[in-house]
Image (tube, grey):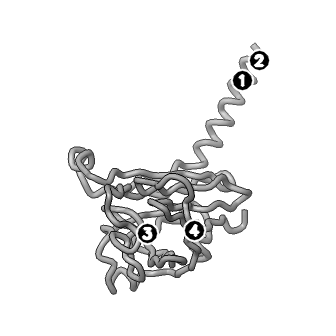
Amino acid sequence: MRILSLFAASLSMVAARGASQAAPPACRVVASGGQLAQRASPLDSAVVELGGAAAKVCYGRPSARGRVIMGGLVPFKEPWRLGANEATTIYVPFVAEIGGVRVQPGTYSLYAIPSDSTWQIVVNRNAARWGIPIDSSVRAQDMGVDTVRAEPVGGKDVETLTLRFAPPKGGTTELIMEWVKTRVRIPVRRVGA
């Protein structure tokens, strides 16, 4: 009986701890279920835990399909939505630095201004928008920019755009973008962790 009571108390503590750490919100989608299923670029997300809380990125995953991607579909020296369809978003439930840009807890959109060797990563306040156009009204809500290196993927080309988090080290990780032959690493750090 005492063992059962201890087991029940342990479960209660785990449940309480889990309830205090809310799950990241669902990805914002501007489509019905049928429309979403017919998209050429499916919706995807990646989650990472930093210091006991989960950060999440949501994005559309276009495929190369024989097209010229870097310098073509992804134009050099022009804003690109870092995915397809809705704006690519990142949710952080804590004060963070995304590519060196300090943000409060919340959801933000990301876009890039790529070149062959470096990418500017832009953090934007407006997460509830379609991915394009990235015009002056969108850019007016930019919170900051960081420049990161572009590097070769090495090995086989990555056919479908992939965003993933590197394994965290303490309160720090990298949001890694890979597509065709290009890899970009965006640092994400929980401030105060």
Tag 2 secondary structure: helix
Q: Which residue is mark 1?
A: 7
Q: Position of residue 175 (x, y in %)?
A: 56, 61
Q: Position of residue 62 (x, y in %)?
A: 35, 57
Q: Which residue is mark 4?
A: 151
Rounded to the nearest angstrom, the CA distance separating label 3 from label 2 is 49 Å
Rounded to the nearest angstrom, the CA distance separating label 4 from label 3 is 23 Å
Instruction: Sort mark 1 into few (<14), some (14-19) or many (20+) by Cα contacts within 10 Å.
Output: few
Q: Is residue 94 left or right of residue 32?
A: right
Of the 4 image quadrants, the one containing the N terminus is top right
Q: Is residue 109 above or below residue 180?
A: below
Name the front one of labels 3 and 1: 3
Circles 2, 1 touching at the beta carbon (< 8 Å): yes
Q: Quadrant of residue 75?
A: bottom left
Picture disc at residue 114: none
Q: Disc 2 marks which amino acid? A: Ile
| Among numbered discs 3 and 2, the one appearing first in the sequence | 2
Rounded to the nearest angstrom, the CA distance separating label 2 from label 1 is 6 Å
Name the front one of labels 3 and 2: 3
Circles 3, 1 touching at the beta carbon (< 8 Å): no
Tag 3 secondary structure: strand
Q: Which residue is mark 2?
A: 3
Picture disc at residue 109: 3
Q: Is residue 33 left or right of residue 17?
A: left
In depth, the one of 125 and 11 nearer the eye is 125
Circles 4, 2 touching at the beta carbon (< 8 Å): no
Q: Residue at x 51, y 62 (%)?
A: 177
Of the 4 image quadrants, the one containing the C terminus is bottom right
Q: Disc 4 marks which amino acid? A: Glu
